[in-house]
Amino acid sequence: MSYWGKFIGGMAGFAMGGPVGALFGAALGHAADEGKLHGLASGVSGFAGRAIPIDRLKMTSMLGRRDQIFAIGVTVLAAKLCKCDGPVTRLEINAFKQSFAIPPDGMAEVARLFDSARESASGYVCYATQLGQAFSDEKAVLEQVLAGLYQIARADGPVNGAEADFLSRVAFGFGLSDAAARRAGQRMPMPRDVEDPYLVMGLQRQAAPEEIRRRWKQLMRENHPDAMASKGAAPEIIKLSSERVARINAAYDAIKRERAF
């Protein structure tokens, strides 16, 4: 199953209010199919029509995967980013669709969640934090999500102050390093042949050849699609890893040519 996953439960949960409510709704939708509603209910400490405190690790283990967390988090962040600097434009919506390749069979559910989330730009930090926690072991995925959000921000013109603040807070919630955030900020709108290879690899220009080689090997270990596949990653993640590895190798080759080593 792709990371867009099932949204039906998530829609009801979002209406309940708050990021925990959205994830709870998604959990209900999945648990109903799997006959796990009784087990999920045991993790709830009350129900009064509002967000309910649930142990996220327990809930994620009940879901069996992070599909709902990813899909809901990405959609809500995109919608609130579009709203943060004023009315949402068609250019921004189209950029969202293109950046995250929403499958046709999930478009209706995604649209409903997007429309609900864009009513207000507030509350997005919680979603960024939850998404960051859920994918703390896959920083490359979070960097790709941030890059997609940058593409949305640039869809109707240069990134403005409100959008820059939004994206900075999301990067912090994701737990990304400054170098990763900078890479995400430059990645989408720039052709690959003009990318700064040192920025792609997270290196200083004065880095010694030995440091550059170590960094390249480290990035290969962390991002290689075979490593992702061995962890049971979804096809979308493996594809993102392949793209990331291609950029890393291109950057490494460019530095080697420049430095002649």
Image (cartoon, rainbow, N blue to C red):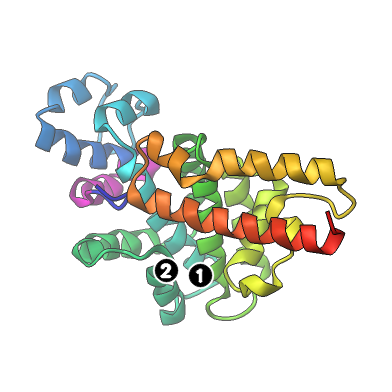
Asked if the residues shown at circle 2 and circle 1 are in contact, with their CB atoms under 8 angstroms apart, the answer is yes
**Which contiguous range is marked in magenta?**
6-22
Amino acid type at mark 1: Ile
Q: Which residue is mark 2?
A: 96
Image disc number at residue 228: none
What kind of secondary structure does the magenta stretch mostly adopt?
A: helix
Residue 30 is situated, as x and y percent measured from the top left of the image, at 18, 38
Query: How far apart are the alpha carbons under marks 2 and 1?
Result: 6 Å
- Picture coordinates of residue 220 (x, y %)? 59, 43
Queried whether the magenta region covers residue 20, the answer comes back as: yes
Mark 2 crowdedness (10 Å alpha carbons): few <14, some 14-19, many ≥20: many
The answer to whether 193 appears left or right of 1 in the picture is: right
Q: Which residue carries the number 1 mark?
A: 152
Which residue corresponds to the image point at 14% horizontal and 28% vertical from the top-left?
37
- Spot occupied by residue 219 in the image (x, y as percentages of width and height): 63, 43
- Res 98 seen here: yes
